[in-house]
Amino acid sequence: MFYAPRTIAFLTELIHPPAQPDPALIQRVHNDLFQTREPAYKSFTVTPAGAVLSNPVTRPGAVSAASFTADRMQFREELSSLTVDAFAAQVRDLCERVTALAKTQVFTAQQVTIHTLINPRHFRDAREFLRGGMFGFDRETEDFGRDPHLLGLRLVFPPSEGQPNAHALRVESYNDDVRSLFIENQASFPPILVARGLDVVADNIHAAYDFLVERALTFVSRFDTRQEA
C-alpha cells in the first residue's frame, strides 16, 4: 500500500446499564493513579453529567479526556500523540480500575471510532483522486452547476454470522488539506461481561484500527494508480 497513515482521533464508548454517576469513585481512581505512577490524565472535574478526567492541550481542536456518565464511559484522544497501542492500554487500565470499584457487571456495547489521514500516491489533490481515480467521474458533477468542495464514499458492514462486529466506513476529501484523504471507521462490538476480563476492550480498539489501516487502505490503494497523461 505504501501509505503512512496519520491517525488524528481515537474515540471509544463503553455503554453500560444506567446508574447514578459517582464522581467520588472517579476521584479515588485518579488519586490512586497519582500515588502509584504517572497518571494518564492530569485533571479531575465534575460536570452535571458526571466526572471528567482530562489533560491540558495547546493545539486548537485537540482533546484528551475520559468522561464517566450515567450510562457510559467515553475516552477521546483527538490530535494527540497517543498511538493505538497506548490508547488501547490506557482505556483497558481505566476500565478495570473503575469497574472494580463501581461493581459494573456488563457493558452492553462498545463503540470505537478511528480517524486517519493519508496522502494518495498518484494524486496531489484528494478530491481529484476520488473524482477520477475512485469514482471515475468525468463531467457528471457539472449537473449541479458548481463543483463540490468535498467528495466522499460511505460503506456499511453489518454484523454477520461469525463476524459479530459492525463497521461504518467513510472515505472523503479533507477540508483542512486538499492533499489528504480522510478515512473514518465507526465500529460496534457486542456486549462484554466484565467477569471474563477486559482485555477484549483493548482488542476491540485494535480490531477497529486494523480494519481501517489494513482492509480500508487496501481497498483505497486499488484506485490509487498512475494516471495516463
Image (tube, helix red, strand yellow):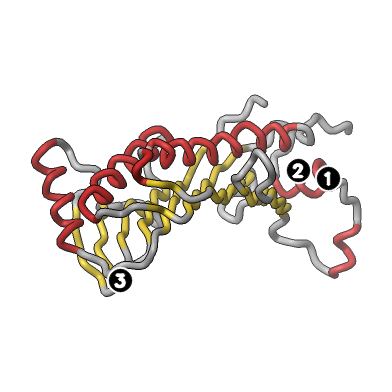
Q: On the image, which quarter does residue 199 sit in?
A: top left
The residue to which callout 3 is attached is 49
| SS under mark 2 | helix
Side of 60 where 158 appears, left or right: right
Query: From the viewer's perspective, is residue 200 above or below residue 153?
Result: above
Residue 99, given in percent of the width and then of the height, sits at: 28, 50
User: Which mark is first along the chain, 1 or 3?
Assistant: 3
Farthest-out residue, bottom: 48
Q: Local crowd at mark 2 within 10 Å, few (<14), some, or many (≥20)?
A: many
Side of 179 where 31 appears, left or right: left
| SS under mark 3 | loop
The residue to which callout 2 is attached is 129
Q: On the image, which quarter does residue 163 sit in?
A: top right
Say which mark, if any, is on residue 132: 1
Circles 2 and 1, Cβ within 8 Å, touching? The answer is yes
Residue 226, given in percent of the width and then of the height, sits at: 81, 29
Q: State how far apart marks 2 and 1 are (Cα).
A: 6 Å
Judging depth in this view, the residue of 99 and 196 nearest the camera is 196
Instruction: Look at label 3 and name its amino acid.
Output: Ala
Circles 2 and 3, Cβ within 8 Å, touching? The answer is no
Farthest-out residue, top: 2
Number of on-image labels: 3
Q: State how far apart marks 3 and 1 are (Cα).
A: 47 Å
Side of 32 where 4 appears, left or right: right
* Residue drawn at (90%, 51%) of the image: 138
* Residue drawn at (56%, 34%) of the image: 210
| SS under mark 1 | helix
Q: Local crowd at mark 3 within 10 Å, few (<14), some, or many (≥20)?
A: few
Residue 170, given in percent of the width and then of the height, sits at: 65, 51
